[in-house]
Amino acid sequence: MPQHVFEPLARTACTSRRSLLLGAANLAVLGFAPLPISRAVAAAVEDYGDYTWGACVINCGNRCPLRVYSKNGRVIRIETDNTIKDGCKPRQIRACLKGRSMRERLYSPDRLKYPMKRVGERGEAKFERITWEEAYETIATRWKAILEKYGPDAVYWQYCSGQQSLVNSRRAWQRLMNIMGGYLKYYGSYSSAQISAAFPYTYGKKVASGVEQIANAKLYVAFGNNPSVTRGSGGSKGYQFRCALEKGHPKTIVIDPIYTDTVAGKVDQWIPIRPGTDAALVEGIAYELIRNGWVDEAFLAKYCIGYDEKTLPKGAPEKSDYKSYILGEADGTPKTPEYASRITGIPVETIVALAREIGTTKPCFIAQGLGPQRQANGEQTARAIAMLAILTGQVGLPGTSTGMEEDGTNWEPVYLPVGENKVKATIPVFLWTDAITRGPEMDATHDGIRGVEKLSNHIRMIVNSGGNTLINQHSDTFKTDKILRDTTKCEFIVVCDNMMTPSARYADILLPDTLGPETFDICGNGDSMGDLACIYPMHKAVEPQWEQKPSWEICLGIARALGVEEAYTEGRDQMGWIRWCYEETRKANPELPSFEAFWNKGPRQLFDVKWQPIMFEDFRKDPEKHPLSTPSGKIEIYSERLAELARTWVLPKGDVISAIPKFVRTAEMPETELAKKYPLQCFGYHGHGRTHSTFHNLPKLREVHPDRLLLNELDAKARGLADGDMVEVFNDRGAIRLPVHVTKRIMPGVCALPQGAWFKPETKDGRTVDAGACINTLTSQHPSPLAKGNPQHSNLVDIRRA
Ligand SMILES: Nc1nc2c(c(=O)[nH]1)N[C@H]1C(S)=C(S)[C@@H](COP(=O)(O)OP(=O)(O)OC[C@H]3O[C@@H](n4cnc5c(=O)[nH]c(N)nc54)[C@H](O)[C@@H]3O)O[C@H]1N2
Ligand SMILES: Nc1nc2c(c(=O)[nH]1)N[C@H]1C(S)=C(S)[C@@H](COP(=O)(O)OP(=O)(O)OC[C@H]3O[C@@H](n4cnc5c(=O)[nH]c(N)nc54)[C@H](O)[C@@H]3O)O[C@H]1N2
Ligand code: SF4
Ligand SMILES: [Mo]
């Protein structure tokens, strides 16, 4: 199919204004007298200035265009991409409330205004204003000293996701850091560490069919997937998901501890489940599939390794195949629906009925969001869920997928080039606090270190720009706080942000960045745009109010102080690099218009760029010719590579790596020692009102989406709690305070709150409580076994009245 570009219908302030007024006139023609309110709106609209294009570049996975109306140097109104005719394709990319709150962000009292240096203890948030020159000089001097004393692998670039534009972002920093010899690398992410590590063992890579395939399915079964919230843009996968359901009308079943907005009134069945137990549910279903002859034996024999003894690899122990495990021939425990029911809290009849649906309905699309894998046993869960697609042969056909979250286009624009990082040492992203405290002890078999046998340094310097993972989004805030306060360990911390965030409090040098409409940039696709591909200009609409500078320019200042300006700029300024990114993107997409046309006209949507709607279609047609990238070329239910890791890695007690996916009960689950002390499971879901911690400080959004603890009626009753009561949620790591929302929308025995609230410790009578209610005050730094990833949804707690 030829690639083509859809043009927005109306682009200028004049046209949009006229169409609004004409709307009012039409109403009058139809016999409706304009109401005073519509007159007021019309008058207000008449008073707008012109608009410029901008974008919300926060990492919710989408990217939404914004139309920024400004007047007399102030942004006065934010609109979005409501200019093209809407439909399922093409569709408007409408910003959500968060993106539309750009004006509130710009004029927030929390804005960082000037460069500052720390004057109190680290973490105390006592700062003094300095000049940009002093900031540049200090950073250059301290950085050079650390490089000289320890080497570049003592410098760490902190994970961050807050700024996803092409030039002013982490890429400017990484470019500079690579010029200076590089920095300690990380692999994985806070988003998908466990599934990213696990899926390649099964399929060779982490992939799924496109969201549109749902329209070809008769049955859609999702585990912990909440696209209505987590893919919330008007143009995103969340919207395309709804379009696919409307088109194909598959039966829809969602398995989630919470009755989410994706579920509410929109799917056929909600099955509440205890967090972390999906693998046990899968096992109960697998038992039924085998018992009833609903497994696709021919598919398993031809395309898979390790379903039964016939296809086990040669060296594998006897009865180590999946079928023997499910039937209990290996461990004496048949994984019956009764077994699964005890673990998951799901009634036996529901499991049996679900198995019948999955066993007898084709095509069946199996999916999982990222919630189920953000658990201490997340790698097992991720691979286990894939088993439902594999056992029933629902892979590589129309209306099927792999068990992962539905995919979108893999189109990417070209970003500011960052150069090469010469440092080889690589840590799992979640283990940076460990790398501060015990760096040189860390190696491959204990800590998943890659690139070197062992780390040779502690982390001595951190650069954190566009992220709040320095404290808020990392686990165990009180522990992290202690680690960061010790200036003998991590000696120097630079933070760059727009707001005085919890992470900003730990800066030695604190730098104020511009926000979108205060500078020029360019922005492209996110990973959750469904089949949309898009690219937007970001115009400067207003001058920065104080001394804020864009990241590009900040790094230029530091580059000068370091004497590497030329290497950093390569003769281009900020606008030159914006143009470069566009021109390079255009080389691969020649249907894009000239830079001038693009820059002056507004966002572009590109359709029909490469994406794979049916994953493994080729493999299904001809597995010899199109083998998977696993060692055997087949789907590996039994993975010899995992068996090898299970033998050679040194794991703490209770951590399990296994060749086939298995339910593993980890330390913070029901029926454990700890559950006697802390009987409730607790996690922080990704809510409507924030993207992680971004937008937390906007009062209007907090009013619309308040931070509340979801608690089932039964658990509330047992504790004498009523809706709205203030409670403390606590475990051995800390306590948070927030109001409780008593509801039927959550599984009994489980409580949950939106993640991302700002950590705000308050001490009274010698006791410190996080009054900000950041979920990470309750989460653990014990990593998951294989990915060494963040188990942030696996927590036991109790609740008391505050
Ligand atoms: N509005 C909004 N959108 C976002 C974000 C945001 O913060 N806000 N963040 C963005 C980012 S970076 C990411 S990585 C994604 C995150 O997207 P996800 O990781 O998918 O989001 P979560 O809310 O953590 O989890 C999804 C669902 O899984 C459920 N769940 C949790 N544990 C389990 C379990 O053990 N089993 C089952 N079956 N279900 C479980 C939760 O109740 C939730 O409804 O969202 C992106 N989009
Ligand atoms: N318990 C728990 N913890 C979690 C999660 C969970 O589900 N549960 N989710 C995890 C996931 S999936 C992720 S991706 C991480 C996300 O963690 P982070 O990547 O840290 O994301 P945010 O918290 O949104 O922080 C983004 C920061 O960027 C800043 N920012 C925004 N725009 C700009 C800009 O233009 N310039 C600069 N310099 N800064 C800007 C914002 O003000 C904000 O402070 O959190 C993880 N943490
Ligand atoms: S938060 Fe996401 S959906 Fe909302 S406006 Fe920003 S990019 Fe769009
Ligand atoms: Mo994420």
Image: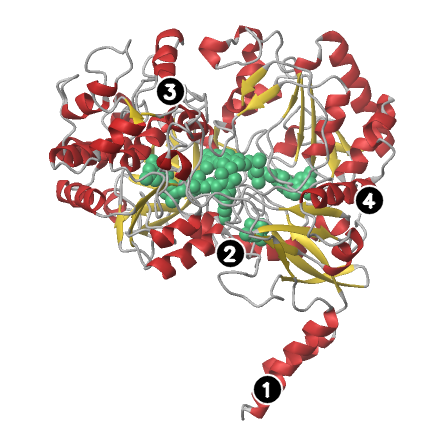
Tag 3: residue type? Answer: Ser
Question: Mark 2 or mark 3: which comes first in sequence?
Answer: 3
Left or right: residue 649 versus residue 599 is: left
> Of the residues tagged 4 and 2, which is closer to the observer?
4
Provide the secondary structure element on which disc 2 rests: helix
Distance from mark 3 CB to nearest ligand 1 atom below 8 Å:
no
Question: Mark 3 or mark 1: which comes first in sequence?
Answer: 1
Tag 4: residue type? Answer: Met
Provide the secondary structure element on which disc 3 rests: loop
Which residue is labeled 4 in the image? Answer: 575
* Mark seen at residue 703: 2
Left or right: residue 108 versus residue 435 is: right
Q: Is residue 661 above or below residue 645?
A: below
Question: Mark 1 or mark 4: which comes first in sequence?
Answer: 1
Label 3 neighbourhood size at 10 Å, few (<14), some (14-19), many (20+)? some
Which residue is labeled 1 in the image? Answer: 26
Measured in 3D between alpha carbons, the distance from the residue under mark 2 to the one under mark 3, in whole angstroms, is 54 Å
Measured in 3D between alpha carbons, the distance from the residue under mark 4 to the one under mark 3, in whole angstroms, is 49 Å
Residue 164 placement (x, y as % from top left): 64, 41
Q: Would you say residue 118 is visible in this rendering?
A: no
Residue 301 placement (x, y as % from top left): 25, 27
Q: Is residue 6 above or below residue 18?
A: above
Q: Are marks 2 and 3 in contact (CB under 8 Å)?
A: no
**Viewer-nearest residue: 699 or 347:** 347
Tag 1: residue type? Answer: Asn
Which residue is labeled 3 in the image? Answer: 632
Left or right: residue 558 versus residue 390 is: right
**Viewer-nearest residue: 637 or 26:** 637
Measured in 3D between alpha carbons, the distance from the residue under mark 4 to the one under mark 2, in whole angstroms, is 39 Å
Label 2 neighbourhood size at 10 Å, few (<14), some (14-19), many (20+)? few
The quadrant of the picture occupied by the C terminus is top left
**Viewer-nearest residue: 394 or 191:** 394
